[in-house]
Image: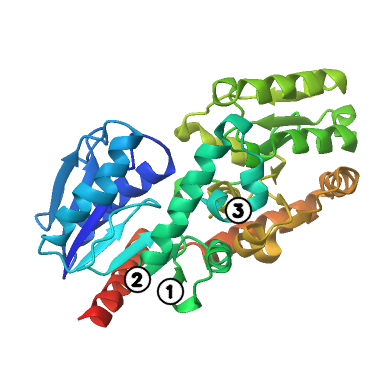
C-alpha cells in the first residue's frame, strides 16, 4: 500500500512536530510493509536518517491564505493524480481528493468544545470560529477520523454528527522510560502544574485554589510553567493575584522549561495538579503518572480516561477543590507512596509504544483502503 501523508501545517516545534519527527524515526527504525510519501513544511527539520521506503516532499507555505490554497486546491490536485492508495492528513486540516480515501487526525479540542472556544480572546474569536467550521467540514468529508483519546472521539462525533464507525480513538504513544527514575519529593514541598499559558489551561483557577487552601502558610510552594511571552495579560494577572492573596513568595512561574529538564520537575514535586479544562490527550498527565508523582486533576472526561483510579479529581468550585487539595497534601507518607505506586502502574497499563501505535495506524489505513478497493 502506498500512503501519502500531508503534514504541511506542522512547523518547527510543539507536540505535532515532535509527533511527526518520531513517526518518521519509528518508520525508519522498525521497517514497514508500505511505501510512505510525506509532504512536509519546508521549515520542519527532518531526521538525519530515513528508510528507503520513505519519500519526502518539502512545501514552502507563505502564510494562512497560501495554506488554504495548498490544502484545498493545489495539494488536492496533486493527491488526485498521485499513485497513492490512501491519504493521511496528520494535523486537523488537509486535501480532500475524490479519488483517494482520506484519513484525518483531529487533535484540537477547541474546535469541538464551545466552553473552550468561548475562552479565546475576543480579537481572535472570528479566526477560531472560521477554523472550527473548516475543521468540521474536513471531518465530514473524510472517510475516517482518528483522535488521540476516547473523550476527543466522543466530542468530535457528537459535535459534527458522525457515526462511531467513522471516528476512532488511537491513543498517543508515550515511552514511560522517558521519565525513568524514582519519585523523590524535595524540600520545601511543592505542587507542580505543567502547561503552556493558554485560556483552557486554567492557571488562574489553580492559583485561586492554592490561595484558598492555605498551604502557603505550611511552607508549600506552587510551581507553574507559565511564560509571559505566551500571554502577557494573563501572566500579569497571575502575578497580581498572588500579590493580592499575599502568596507571592510561594508562587514560582517558571517560564518555558526545556523538555530535558521537565522530568526532574515531576520527580521532585510533592503533588502534580492538572488544571486544564479540556485536552485531546494530556501529555503532562501521563508524564506525571509515569514519574510516580501523586496526581490530582480537574474532573474532566480526558483526565478520567488517562488516569483512571490512580488520580484524585477536583471539582470546579474553588473552595471545594482547595479543601481536597489540602487533604491530599496532608496524607501521611505511606499513603502518598501507595498513591505513587498506583500512578506508575497506571502509566505502564495505559501507555502504548511507538511501534504499537504505528501498527495500529497501519491497520486503520489498510481497513479504509480495503473499503474503497
Q: Give the label, 3 or 2, closer to the camera.
A: 2
User: Who's the residue at 20% across and 50% down the image?
Assistant: 75
Under tag 2, what secondary structure?
A: loop
Query: Which residue: 28% across, 48% down?
Result: 71
x then y, percent, for residue 96: 28, 60
Q: Residue at x 61, y 25 (%)?
A: 254
* Secondary structure beneath label 3: helix
**Nearer-the-camera pick, 12 or 82:** 82
Q: Earlier in the sequence, mark 2 or mark 1?
A: 2
Instruction: From the viewer's side, name the closer residue of 111 and 291.
Output: 111
* Cα gap from disc 3 to disc 2, whole angstroms: 35 Å
Mark 3 or 2 closer to N-term? 2
Spot occupied by residue 308 in the image (x, y as percentages of width and height): 66, 65
| 122 displayed left or right of 82 | right
Q: From the image, tell me which residue sits under label 2.
A: 143
Report the colour scheme: rainbow
Circle 3 residue:
289
Looking at the rendering, which quadrant does residue 9 occupy? Answer: top left
Check contact, mark 2 vs mark 1: CB within 8 A.
yes
Instruction: Give the distance between the C-alpha atoms of the residues marked 1 and 3, in whole angstroms.
Output: 31 Å
Point out the frontmost of discs 1 and 3. 1
Q: Which numbered tag is attached to residue 166? A: 1
Amino acid at each position: 500500500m502506498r500512503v501519502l501523508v500531508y503534514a504541511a501545517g506542522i512547523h518547527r516545534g510543539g507536540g505535532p512536530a515532535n509527533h511527526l519527527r518520531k513517526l518518521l524515526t519509528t518508520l525508519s527504525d522498525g521497517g514497514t510493509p508500505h511505501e510512505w510519501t510525506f509532504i512536509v513544511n519546508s521549515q520542519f527539520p527532518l531526521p538525519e536518517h530515513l528508510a528507503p521506503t520513505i519519500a519526502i516532499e518539502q512545501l514552502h507555505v507563505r502564510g494562512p491564505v497560501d495554506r488554504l490554497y495548498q490544502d484545498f486546491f493545489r495539494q488536492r490536485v496533486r493527491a488526485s493524480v498521485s499513485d497513492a492508495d490512501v491519504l493521511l492528513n496528520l494535523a486537523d486540516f488537509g486535501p480532500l481528493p475524490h479519488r483517494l480515501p482520506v484519513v484525518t487526525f483531529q487533535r484540537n479540542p477547541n474546535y469541538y468544545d464551545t466552553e473552550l472556544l468561548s475562552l479565546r480572546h475576543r480579537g481572535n474569536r472570528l479566526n477560531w470560529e472560521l477554523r472550527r467550521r473548516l475543521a468540521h467540514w474536513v471531518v465530514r468529508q473524510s472517510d475516517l477520523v482518528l483522535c488521540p483519546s476516547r473523550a476527543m472521539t466522543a466530542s468530535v462525533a457528537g459535535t459534527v454528527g458522525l457515526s462511531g464507525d467513522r471516528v476512532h480513538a488511537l491513543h498517543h504513544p508515550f515511552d514511560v522510560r522517558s521519565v525513568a527514575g524514582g519519585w523523590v519529593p524535595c524540600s520545601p514541598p511543592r505542587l507542580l502544574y505543567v502547561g503552556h499559558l493558554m485560556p483552557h489551561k486554567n492557571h488562574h483557577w489553580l492559583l485561586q485554589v492554592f490561595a484558598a487552601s492555605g498551604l502557603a502558610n505550611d511552607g508549600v510552594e506552587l510551581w507553574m510553567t507559565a511564560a509571559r511571552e505566551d500571554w502577557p495579560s494573563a501572566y500579569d494577572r497571575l502575578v497580581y493575584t498572588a500579590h493580592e492573596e499575599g502568596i507571592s513568595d510561594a508562587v514560582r512561574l517558571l517560564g518555558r522549561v526545556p523538555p530535558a529538564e521537565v522530568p526532574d520537575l515531576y520527580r521532585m514535586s510533592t503533588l502534580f495538579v492538572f488544571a486544564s479544562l479540556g485536552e485531546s490527550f494530556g501529555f503532562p498527565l501521563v508524564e506525571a503518572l509515569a514519574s510516580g508523582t501523586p496526581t490530582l486533576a480537574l474532573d474532566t472526561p480526558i483526565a478520567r480516561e488517562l488516569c483512571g483510579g490512580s488520580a484524585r479529581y477536583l471539582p470546579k468550585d474553588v473552595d471545594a477543590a482547595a479543601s481536597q487539595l489540602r487533604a491530599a497534601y496532608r496524607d501521611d507518607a505511606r499513603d502518598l507512596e501507595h498513591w505513587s505506586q498506583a500512578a506508575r502502574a497506571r502509566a505502564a497499563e495505559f501507555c502504548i509504544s511507538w511501534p504499537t501505535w504505528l501498527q495500529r495506524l497501519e491497520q486503520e489505513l489498510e481497513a479504509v483502503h480495503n473499503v474503497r478497493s
